[in-house]
Amino acid sequence: MKKMTAVMLVLAFLAAVPIARAQAGAVPETEKEAAVRAALDYSDGAYSGDAARMERAIHPDLNKVIFGRRPPMTGLMSRYSTFSDLVELTRPALFFVEPEKRLTETAVLEITEDVACLRVKTAQWCDYLQLIKVNGQWKIINVLWTLGLSAPAAAKVVPGFDAEKERPAAGQAALDFVEARLAGDAARLEKVLHPETSQVTFLVAPKTSIGFVTRARYTGILEPVKAKVGVVPETERAAEVRVLDLMDGLAFAVARTAAGAAYVQLQLMDGQWKAINVLVRPANNAFRQGPPPAPPKK
């Protein structure tokens, strides 16, 4: 029971922790190449019917989601894929496409020593990928995707999407997500949350150096903020937000403070940006035993 209490305190702390500045420094090209290989194991593995490549690329706690418009509905409907979905549907080659028709493009948008943000565009799907490095291997943990390069313009989720026009609003939504939590402003946070918002926190256990994840969804993100857990003084709320990329109603942003980093995948819905997938990486690179330390006395 004592151990469980400590774990719950950790999770409550992480649910509202100031979201973190990534470690500075150049990342070797070999790491970028390894992250791209994982992305291609996922994409080309699906297209070639190679279940072993797919399984190698994705994390067991994968959260993959698309929002599509389905006539005669006017709103957006979510659809999920899980680890077992992707592996088992790849096995009988249900996604098979000839290599020359795949139109694959990859881009590394952001990478640190153990977190990578990639974009993969192909004929049938265009994906934003969040990857974590676990036990020396890059694994895809979150995916937000849209229709591929071969899809007709009329099928796009947000017809006529203007990426540069939407960039400031997407950045503001990511900033709202971070600052609202630091300030304990539940109303502001709720405006950028979606019922399907899912946040994963990536940690490394100090005794074993084994990486692991915890996941929180809508209420697990919002309720600690309502309870003012993790509120910091106004002078300590400074956040740096950068929009890494936009496409077809999707945005990928990173928000940093002194405590770590949050990588936010957003969806444009009825003119409003909503956080869908969030990857939090605390800067201390370790699992904290017990509650956060008390602030120093002035």
Image (cartoon, grey):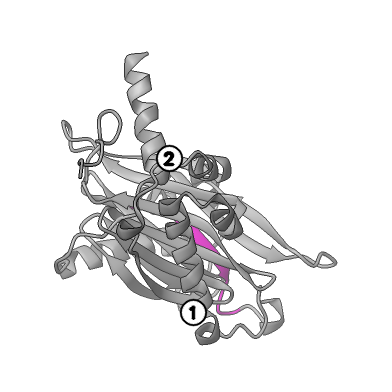
Q: Please, which residue is most extreme toward the right here?
A: 72
Q: Label 2 amino acid?
A: Val
Q: Of 176 and 142, which appears nearest the observer?
A: 176
| Main SS of residues in magenta | strand
Q: Residue 258: name its quadrant.
A: bottom left
**Secondary structure at numbered mark 1:** helix
Q: Is residue 260 visible?
A: yes
Label 2 packing within 10 angstroms: few (<14), some (14-19), many (20+): some
Q: Identify the disc placed on residue 168.
A: 1
Please give left or right for residue 250 compared with residue 208 in the image: right
Please provide the residue range marked out in magenta: 139-150
Q: Residue at x 30, y 31 (%)?
A: 291
Q: Nearer the viewer, residue 10 or 247?
A: 10
Residue 45 seen anywhere in this rendered image of the structure:
no
Quadrant holding the N terminus: top left
Q: Tag 2, which secondary structure?
A: loop
Say if 290 sits above or below 120 in the image.
Answer: above
Residue drawn at 59 percent across, 54 percent down? 187
Rate crowding at label 1 as few (under 14), some (14 to 19) or many (20 or more) other CA atoms within 10 Å. Answer: few
Spatial CA distance of label 2 from label 1 is 29 Å
